């Protein structure tokens, strides 16, 4: 694998794709490329999570942002996390269908898109994304975007792998603000209200700004965009490229990173699949299963 690794680090996309598959399948752990620490306020970000509820147009907006950055010479890679089939573990790969930047010959050498299945991760962002993002950075990609599956405020797990969090909202969702603020909106470094060409977008952006103002803290910027129509995309692309960490929820971010690493130790345990089988067969209960997974590498309870 050494020659293939050197080829990937030298810019060979086929070698890079094969090693990303190896990481995804658990056959290659890039120990020499540890996960990047959260960027400080003075640093520029390297990994950014883009999340939000289904139907707000994340994929189209991300594609427009990648086009804007690549046109300016920035090399940007996207890890699009698709929902997995709970039975087969396969991904729907819907995000790639919406991506046009990879087919644009003027910028295709500065854009890379990879779809990933959530597989065995209990969160919407699989733990392997952390390793894949670090590997892409090592291969020379300047910025890595992670587009999550979009289950609303439950996307807190994206905080475990990203330096910055972008929340994409849609128009006319005002009644849900208070509920959402308790989740992901509380961690957002910036909020993009997409589909700005539709009625209700400006009202929702105003409601968000008013709601943030009640916190008495430095509130994240709220911008109006339309990935489909191109409205506000240039402004958003510039704002995101130089986005500083809001620092509003560092403890929550570290909590999610800690939980993610704990989950990693369980999912990667050699006895994990056997314990799942035993749970399905009814020969173990949840507490017994946890005791097995807390045991040594042979699955013996400690």
Image (cartoon, rainbow, N blue to C red):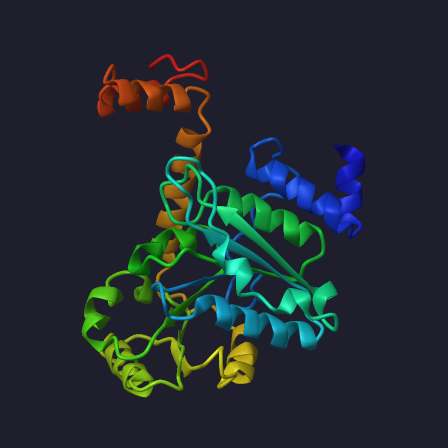
- The residue drawn where x is 56% and y is 34% is 25
Quarter of the image with the C terminus in it: top left
In this view, 226 is above or below 23: below
User: x%, y% of residue 93?
Assistant: 50, 52
In this view, 250 is above or below 293: below
Quarter of the image with the N terminus in it: top right
Asked if one can make out residue 242 in the rendered structure from this viewpoint, the answer is no
User: x%, y% of residue 291?
Assistant: 30, 20
- The residue drawn where x is 36% and y is 22% is 293
Asked if one can make out residue 256 in the rendered structure from this viewpoint, the answer is yes
Left-right relation of 179 to 147: left
User: x%, y% of residue 240?
Assistant: 52, 74
Q: Tally the marks.
A: 0
- The residue drawn where x is 25% and y is 82% is 207
Quadrant position of residue 88: top left
- The residue drawn where x is 28% and y is 86% is 203
Q: Nearer the viewer, residue 34 or 141?
A: 141
In this view, 284 is above or below 163: above
User: x%, y% of residue 53?
Assistant: 34, 64
In this view, 129 is above or below 69: above
Q: Nearer the viewer, residue 205 or 32?
A: 205
């Amino acid at each position: 694998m050494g020659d293939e690794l050197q080829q990937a680090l030298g810019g060979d996309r086929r070698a890079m794709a094969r090693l990303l598959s190896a990481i995804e399948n658990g056959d290659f752990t890039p120990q020499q490329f540890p996960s990047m620490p959260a960027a400080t306020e003075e640093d520029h970000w390297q990994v950014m999570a883009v999340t939000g509820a289904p139907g707000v147009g994340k994929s189209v907006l991300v594609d427009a942002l990648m086009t804007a950055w690549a046109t300016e010479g920035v090399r940007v890679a996207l890890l699009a996390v698709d929902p997995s089939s709970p039975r087969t573990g396969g991904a729907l790969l819907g995000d790639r269908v919406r991506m046009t930047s990879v087919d644009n010959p003027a910028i295709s050498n500065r854009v890379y898109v990879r779809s990933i299945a959530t597989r065995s991760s209990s969160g919407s962002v699989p733990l392997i994304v952390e390793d894949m993002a670090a590997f892409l950075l090592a291969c020379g990609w300047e910025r890595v975007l992670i587009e999550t599956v979009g289950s609303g405020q439950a996307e807190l797990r994206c905080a475990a792998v990203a330096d910055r969090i972008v929340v994409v909202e849609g128009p006319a969702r005002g009644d849900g603000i208070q509920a959402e603020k308790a989740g992901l909106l509380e961690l957002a470094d910036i909020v993009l209200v997409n589909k700005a060409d539709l009625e209700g977008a400006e009202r929702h952006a105003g409601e968000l700004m008013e709601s943030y103002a009640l916190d008495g803290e430095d509130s994240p910027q709220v911008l109006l965009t339309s990935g489909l129509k191109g409205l506000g995309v240039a402004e958003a692309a510039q704002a995101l490229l130089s986005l500083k960490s809001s620092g509003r929820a560092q403890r929550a971010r570290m909590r999610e990173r800690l939980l993610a690493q704990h989950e990693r130790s369980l999912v990667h345990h050699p006895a994990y699949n056997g314990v799942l089988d035993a749970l399905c067969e009814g020969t173990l209960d949840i507490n017994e299963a946890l005791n097995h997974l807390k045991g040594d590498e042979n699955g013996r309870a400690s």
